[in-house]
Image (spheres, rainbow, N blue to C red):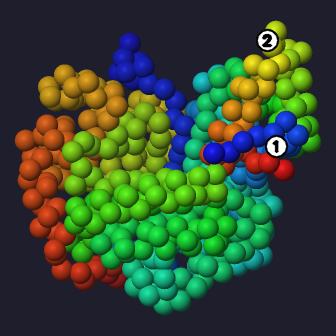
Amino acid sequence: MTTIQESDIVRLPRGVRLREDKRRGGWVLLAPERVFQLDGIAQAVVGHVDGERSVGAIIDGLCETYQAPRERIAEDVTAMFAGLVEKRVLEVA
Amino acid sequence: MTHSQAHDVQPPMGMLAELTHRCPLQCPYCSNPVALERRRQELDTATWQRVFAEAAELGVLQVHLSGGEPALRPDLPELVTACVDAGLYSNLITAGVNIDRVRLETLADAGLDHVQLSFQGATPEVTDHVANMTGAHARKRAFAAEVTDVGLPLTLNAVIHRANLHQIDEFVDLAVELGARRLEIAHAQYYGWALVNRAALMPSREQVMEAVERVEAARERLQGRLVIDAVVPDYHARLPKPCMNGWGRQSLNVTPSGKVLPCHAAETIPHLEFWNVADHGLREIWYDSPAFNAYRGTDWMPETCQSCERKEIDWGGCRCQALMLTGDATQMDPVCEKSPYHDEVQTLAVRDASGASEFTYRRFARTTESA
């Protein structure tokens, strides 16, 4: 079971790319022989991953955009990142 | 309303580009057709570049540069560049026996995204025997080390069958040792060359079940370290595989000479009309060519499939397999337990599992012309 701390810095590993899918609409995460179609929330979260900001800073940024309790956003974001790390499309720097 | 609109056809996500059928290996389960296309028939650089641009425009996101051995094409770096320019994710599917460090760096610098490397066995004895190439295993190991050293993500691909099914744990160890991020354990699929060699490749049901358990255990043990994708063997199964996730639904395959197929085995269905990129744009081929529309959607399905709740899960299984085992490509996949041919297939699997072990290696047919 992977756990993500707010102090962690996450990044997309080489071979994983976030791009817009103009033909179908929305954004996708392209990974080795896999395509992850992101919903609006996942896109917003993954879009903040720059390999420099900590997970806590990403959560703070999202709090400004979304009117939701920080605790709730933190829970969703760390769970999403943990899932992506387990799929090896995200890594802790 | 055109035929294609009737099926509400979505754009493809992936394209397999068979750049050449030439290969230094001779694996007896090769997915290329038994009648291999020759060098003089291969598309030129400019045509592939156009095809990649058209693919991206059509909606393709990932291109799998495959073969044969794609690295036998001197223009491989230019083709990777064409993918990058079009915004396509490029995946090199290679045997890894003929790419030196300099060439690998050229490919990485061009923007190659990922390398999938085949291992025919987990030990030199098995790899060299199955690939029919002395020293293949050692070269692959050295290549894998270069790939991770250059910083490219690596997937190991192991096609498994009776001669290497006992090596599952060793394949897993090899993947971890070589720094692979992903391991594909794919049971041989019996088309083309593998069909020729079916009696030498078919495992017993017990072997298959043991392999499935070992894969599952490794997956759990290595969660977060190694992604393991498994392609299940289907002759021993009760339900058919969702072949290609549906005919003409998500992906297409371009052969070395430019024929565009719904899957790499589609040419085994003799009455289908395939269009070539030399004569048509890729968009036109995807939406309007007879071969792509032949088994799209569910209209073509027999009554048993039409009334089945799984019809949009497995899409009737595999058309090539239906033809091969029943003589009719519109039959339900005979692997399905609802098929009247199901028992016959199981009997055949049991018989082949104790067949002779000699391989007929993949090679070009002898003719007076050279490849």
Dot 1 corresponds to which residue?
A10
Residue B106, image x, y percentages: 78, 67
Quadrant in which the C terminus of chain B is drawn? bottom left
Seen in the picture, residue B146 relative to B75 is either above or below; the reply is: below
- Amino acid type, mark 1: Val
**Quick one: which residue is furthest to the bottom in this view?**
B134
Q: Position of residue B58 (x, y in %)?
A: 58, 33
> Which residue is pictured at 65% across the width and 28% down the height?
A38
**Label 2: which residue?**
A68
Residue B187's disc number: none
Give the residue drawn at x 23%, y 81%: B357
Residue B165 locus on image (x, y percent): 36, 70
Identify the residue at horizontal 76%, vertical 40% (top origin): A4
Q: Residues within 10 Å of mark 2 (few under 14, many from 20)?
A: few
Q: Is residue B86 left or right of residue B314?
A: right
Outermost residue to the top: A67
- Callout 2 secondary element: loop
The amino acid at mark 2 is Ala
Above or below: residue B3 compared with residue B158: above
Q: Earlier in the sequence, mark 1 or mark 2?
A: 1
Distance from the alpha carbon under mark 1 to that under mark 2: 23 Å
Which of the 4 image quarters holds residue A2?
Answer: top right
Proximity of marks 1 and 2: CB atoms separated by less than 8 Å: no
Give x and y (percent) for residue A85: 69, 45
Q: Is residue B86 visible?
A: no
